Image (tube, rainbow, N blue to C red):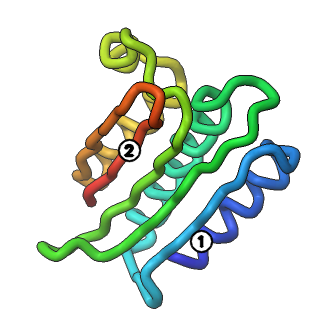
């Protein structure tokens, strides 16, 4: 899973950030998941990273996004995507229920692997999305 996340984030950095944002990736060495879980987590990570790069920082403002994956103490895997930008808009919870295509993809992938999404937000300090699978 770690190699997959590193490649995915390298491709996103090349294709999206244009050098303005920094994407830091860390993954527990040897982290293994089923192919179904790996595909779902890759799609979820892609959507969360793209959203962080698009919305966390003002246009032209440099910023950082952290992506990490590790084994959960209770078993399974934890994927986190955190930014240090503006935080979520006040109406995010309401908007995310309907959501655009990205949030629908995330919800579908979460259901497919029986995972949960947690969101921590600190306006002005960023947002952190945690997937527990």
Residue 92: x and y in percent read 39, 17
Look at the image and tell me in which quarter the C terminus lies.
bottom left
Q: Looking at the image, is 92 positioned above or below residue 40?
A: above
Q: Residue at x 32, y 45 (%)?
A: 110
In-front residue for pair 114/82 = 82
Which label lies toward us, 1 or 2? 2
**Please, what secondary structure does the residue beneath circle 1 have?**
helix
Residue 82: x and y in percent read 47, 48
124 relative to 122 in the view: left or right: right
**Please, what secondary structure does the residue beneath circle 2 have?**
strand
Q: Residue at x 41, y 26 (%)?
A: 123
Q: Residue at x 51, y 51 (%)?
A: 45
Circle 2 packing at 10 Å, graded few (<14), some (14-19), many (20+), is: many
Q: Residue furthest front?
A: 124
Q: Looking at the image, is 27 positioned above or below residue 80?
A: below
In-front residue for pair 128/45 = 128
Q: Looking at the image, is 60 positioned above or below residue 49?
A: above
Label whose residue precedes the other's in the sequence (1 or 2): 1
Q: Residue furthest left?
A: 74
The image quarter containing residue 107 is top left
53 relative to 92 in the view: left or right: right
Between the C-alphas of marks 1 and 2, the distance is: 19 Å
102 relative to 13 in the view: left or right: left
The image quarter containing residue 57 is top right
Residue that label 1 marks? 4
Residue 47: x and y in percent read 55, 40
38 relative to 59 in the view: left or right: left
Residue that label 2 marks? 129
Residue 12: x and y in percent read 73, 52
Q: Residue at x 58, y 37 (%)?
A: 52
Q: Looking at the image, is 2 positioned above or below residue 54?
A: below
């Amino acid at each position: 899973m770690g190699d997959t996340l590193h490649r995915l984030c390298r491709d996103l950095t090349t294709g999206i950030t244009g050098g303005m944002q920094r994407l830091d990736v860390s993954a527990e060495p040897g982290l293994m998941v089923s192919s179904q879980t790996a595909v779902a987590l890759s799609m979820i990570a892609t959507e969360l990273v793209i959203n962080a790069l698009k919305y966390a920082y003002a246009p032209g403002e440099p910023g950082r996004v952290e992506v990490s994956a590790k084994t959960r103490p209770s078993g399974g895997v934890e994927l986190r995507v955190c930014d240090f930008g503006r935080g979520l808009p006040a109406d995010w919870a309401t908007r995310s229920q309907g959501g655009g295509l990205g949030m629908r993809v995330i919800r579908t992938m979460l259901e497919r692997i029986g995972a949960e999404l947690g969101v921590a937000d600190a306006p002005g300090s960023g947002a952190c999305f945690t997937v527990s699978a």
